[in-house]
Image (tube, helix red, strand yellow):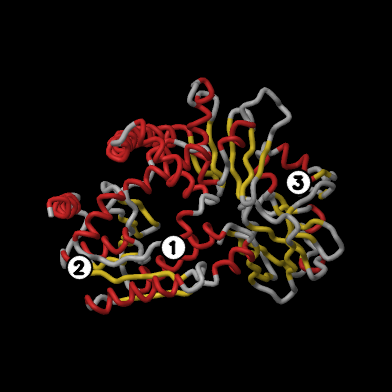
Amino acid sequence: MEKQNSLISRFINYNFFSHEEVFLVAVSGGVDSVVLFHIFTKLQLRFIVCHCNFHLREGDCDEDENLVRKLCKENNIPFLVKHFDTKKIAEEKKISVELAARELRYEWFKKICSEKNINSLVVAHHANDNIETALYHLVKGTGISGLRGMNNITKWGEKKIIRPLLFATKNEIIDYARENNLQWREDYTNADNKFARNLIRNEIIPKLKTINPNLEKNFYDTAERISHVELLFFEELKKIRRRYCHEDEGLFVIEVTELKKNKWFHTVMWELLKSYEFSYKEIGIFLRDSIEVRVIENKNYKLYDLGRTWVVSKKENLNIRKEVQDDEMKVEWQNMILERRDFNKYEIVKDRCFAAVDADKLIFPLTLRFWREGDVFYPIGKNRFRKNVSNFLNDLKIILPKKKKVCVLENGDGKIIWVVGLRVDDRFKITDKTKKIVQYKIQNR
């Protein structure tokens, strides 16, 4: 009974839970989650159980579900279950079954929390799980957060994930289950070392314990120290972000001249840019002594090296075009809105967001599109001259990421009416002979 009381007393000491709040508790039927379930009932906490049936072990998954259902029924706890065709979904997404199962369960958990106004998901990760996670991250490559492993509490969008058993070893959990005569299910696939985490659990950790039998306790203490270093690091990172980074019309801009002088530049840049899906290795490409490397891109973002600054831009589909019909008064395209008004008389508005043109010179449908190499127009002004759009943008000193996003409004005969937000073409300007005027206004959505 001493171990049992020790486990519960330590659980209580962390003070993660309130009797006023309702929690969503993930219960698989394994010993870890069954012990978590038992502690919740023993402490009379309010909770709902969610269980995923991934149909990955023929027959066994249904037995897992039956066990959890029985536990909930006997203790009068609300029970939710979701069935997934995991293998099929993994094949469709071209990802591993492990990753598919993870994505499916957390997506469902988040949906439940939203529908039932629950703020906290509780899972049964323990000390051994944390060691596995840290070692897995270390082998794959990681930053300071990966070395620390899992936190007791993790932000999860507007919700949070609580892991109240991280202090407990697997053996302590099993001892607790046996002392309380709990029933649980064993997942036979946990013995299959073709999965990386199983190999770490079954082969590597036992060998590490021959070096230090107190591995779990020592790792827990080490992880706590690393988490404190992590807090200090991210406080400094906030200062760097405030001083050297800013947003500019949807672009993330980093002033790098001073930062480059520091040995920690590579690591800091990765921390600043990893939310834009760039890897540590990709960031290193920009640190090479090659002036040819000016831009790298991933699925969703581009990173530009502009010398004094690095700029992140969300990738746009530059091939998309939007037709603008004669009777359309409002057109939405990309992240902008184009609005039209008709006038017989017009007072010129000195604002680049407006373009007033001679309506009789318009041939519909017009086309709203990104500019491309080879585009030319006649910028309105004192001197009527032909100019490449590319050169025009260079003259305005528009940086490359912004330059890529510039759009044009094209007439039905292929002539450019307006370099949107910058300059109207002289051929479409209002003159004394103009009888009807069309004004276009551009704004962000």
Which residue is found at the position 22% from the left and 65% from the top? 181
76 left or right of 408 in image: left
Q: Residue 317 location, x and y as percent? A: 70, 56
Counting from the top left corner in percent of width and height, residue 144 is at 42, 36
381 shown above or below 211:
below
The residue at which mark 3 appears reads as 381
Q: Earlier in the sequence, mark 2 or mark 1?
A: 2
Q: Indicate the quadrant containing the C terminus: top left, top right, bottom left or bottom right.
A: bottom right
- Type of residue at label 3? Gly
- Residue 206: x, y in percent? 39, 40
In this picture, residue 329 sits left or right of residue 46:
right
Q: Residue at x 54, y 42 (%)?
A: 252
- Crowding around mark 1 (Cα neighbors within 10 Å: few <14, some 14 to 19, many 20+) is few
Query: 214 or 10, which lies in front?
Result: 214
Is 63 situated above or below 382?
A: below
Mark 2: few/some/many CA within 10 Å (<14, 14-19, 20+): some
Q: Check disc 2 and report the residue beneath it.
A: 41
Helix, strand or loop at mark 1: helix
Residue flagged by tag 1: what amino acid is it? Tyr
Is residue 20 among what the camera can see? no
Disc on the earlier residue, 2 or 3: 2
